[in-house]
Every structure is written in structure tokens, then in C-alpha cells.
């Protein structure tokens, strides 16, 4: 005799009116929703023991209630939570990626670099949350406007190699008058290594010969940065 499965997921519809994030968004606006409520709208339903909102509260708690930490989760990691299947996990990752791209669009609208903070705003969405190192160069015109962003190299957790000849070949081709270097430290440390200092000086000296000025070199992490220029190391 075939048995039927009586298990049903708790949906948002089963919540009281005050706890329904969709209705709350319509009535009070998107800013009234908590992070958990926004995520609950994305996944739609919870599991047999938890509503979507409660499930998302638990997911956020597992990532210290920080969206930056949540953004690094994989499909497999999301699927460890009861009630999150592959489709819901993919939906969560897609929504988080859209948010990241929205921030990147804002950064790309910046026309002129006037401070190290400007560089951070441009580069943090690109390399700030990577778990491996990447080395980039921003190429500027004589008005300090970015005319080209070039990914020079990709490394491991602790370092990356930089081809100085390739850097200046690209800079000359773009009629660059000045450059800014940027790379990330996945470890989160902002202290420049000896190799960071050495490559900075090497590129600075090569730029002098070609009349391409090195304005700054930033080490970027998730939340902050170190500027060689601000610290008078250039």
C-alpha cells in the first residue's frame, strides 16, 4: 500500500499578516524589511518546522549576520540548511550577485580619481572579497580620469606575480599619463609585504623612464585598504 507524505513546508502565506515580508514591503516599503525578510521573499518557503523568515534568520546567524560573509557561500553550503534545495540556493546566490554588480556599476560611474578612497570604491567590489590575490592597474589620463582598468595577474592565497613589461606595454597603448596599482590581501591584513614594497618601487622607477607616474598602490581587503601614497611610501 502506497503511503502519502504529509510533510509540508511552511510558506510565507502561513504567517500572520504582520509577519509577511511581501505584504510588509507593499505596505511600508523595501527599507522596512530586515535582511532575513528580504531573503525570505527570495526563497519563498521554509521547512516543516520553520517559516521562510525564521529559516533565513538562522542562515544569517550562521554567517554572523553579515551579508559580506553570506556572499561567499556556495550552492552546496546553502543546501546544508534544511529547506534550502538547489533551486533556492541558486536563487540566493543570483540575488547576492545582482547586489554586487549594482555596487560595481556605481563605482564605474566615478569619473575622476581624487583620493585613495576613490580607488577603494572602484576596486573593492572587484577584488575585495576574493579568496586569492589579484593584481590590477588603473590607467589614468592627465585629468586623473580612469581610461582603462587592466587585470595584470592572478595568484594564490599569499601572492601573485607582476610582469612589469606587460604593464607598461598596455599603459603606453592606452596613452596613459599615470597609473595606480591595486591588489587584494585575502588574509585581511593591510600590512604591505617586502615583495609589495619591492614591486611598487620597481614600477615607480620604470615609470619615471617612460614618463608615466605611479600615483599610488592600494592593498585592499573586504572592509578597508592601505595606501602607499597616504603613508608616504611612494
Image: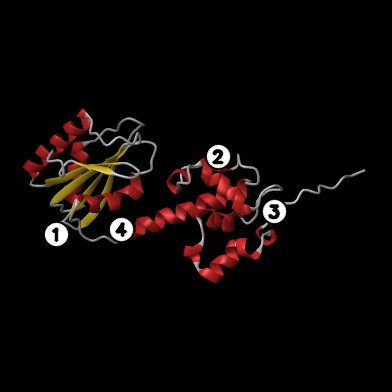
In this orientation, which residue lies closer to the viewer: 101 or 170? 101
* CA–CA distance in space, label 3 to label 1: 57 Å
Q: Residues within 10 Å of mark 3 (few under 14, many from 20)?
A: some
* CA–CA distance in space, label 2 to label 1: 46 Å
x, y percent for residue 111: 23, 61
Q: Report the disc number at residue 108.
A: 4
Mark 2: secondary structure: helix
Residue with the most extreme bottom position: 27
Q: Who's the residue at 65% across and 54% down the image? A: 45
Q: Residue at label 1?
A: 143
x, y percent for residue 148: 24, 53
Mark 4: secondary structure: helix
Q: Are marks 2 and 1 in contact (CB under 8 Å)?
A: no
Q: Residue at label 2?
A: 77
Quadrant of image for the N terminus: top right
Q: Of callouts 3 and 2, which one flags the residue occurring earlier in the amino acid sequence?
A: 3
Q: Report the disc number at residue 88.
A: none
Amino acid at each position: 500500500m502506497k503511503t502519502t507524505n504529509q510533510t509540508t513546508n511552511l510558506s510565507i502565506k502561513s504567517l500572520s499578516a504582520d509577519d509577511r515580508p511581501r505584504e510588509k514591503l507593499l505596505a511600508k516599503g523595501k527599507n522596512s524589511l530586515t535582511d532575513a525578510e528580504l531573503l525570505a521573499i527570495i526563497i519563498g518557503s521554509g521547512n516543516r518546522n520553520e517559516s521562510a523568515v525564521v529559516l533565513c534568520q538562522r542562515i544569517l546567524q550562521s554567517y554572523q549576520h553579515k551579508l559580506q560573509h553570506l556572499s561567499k557561500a556556495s550552492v552546496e553550503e546553502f543546501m546544508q540548511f534544511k529547506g534550502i534545495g538547489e533551486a533556492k540556493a541558486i536563487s540566493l546566490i543570483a540575488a547576492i550577485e545582482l547586489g554586487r554588480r549594482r555596487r560595481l556599476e556605481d563605482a564605474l560611474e566615478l569619473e575622476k580619481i581624487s583620493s585613495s578612497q576613490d580607488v577603494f570604491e572602484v576596486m573593492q567590489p572587484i577584488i575585495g572579497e576574493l579568496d586569492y590575490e589579484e593584481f590590477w592597474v588603473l590607467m589614468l589620463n592627465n585629468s586623473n580620469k580612469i581610461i582603462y582598468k587592466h587585470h595584470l595577474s592572478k595568484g594564490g592565497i599569499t601572492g601573485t606575480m607582476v610582469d612589469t613589461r606587460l604593464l607598461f606595454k598596455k599603459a603606453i597603448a592606452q596613452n596613459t599619463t599615470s597609473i595606480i596599482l591595486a591588489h587584494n590581501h585575502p588574509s585581511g591584513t593591510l600590512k604591505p609585504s617586502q615583495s609589495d614594497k619591492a614591486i611598487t618601487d620597481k614600477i615607480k622607477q620604470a615609470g619615471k623612464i617612460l614618463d608615466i607616474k605611479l600615483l599610488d598602490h592600494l592593498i585592499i581587503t573586504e572592509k578597508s585598504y592601505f595606501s602607499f601614497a597616504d603613508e608616504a611610501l611612494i
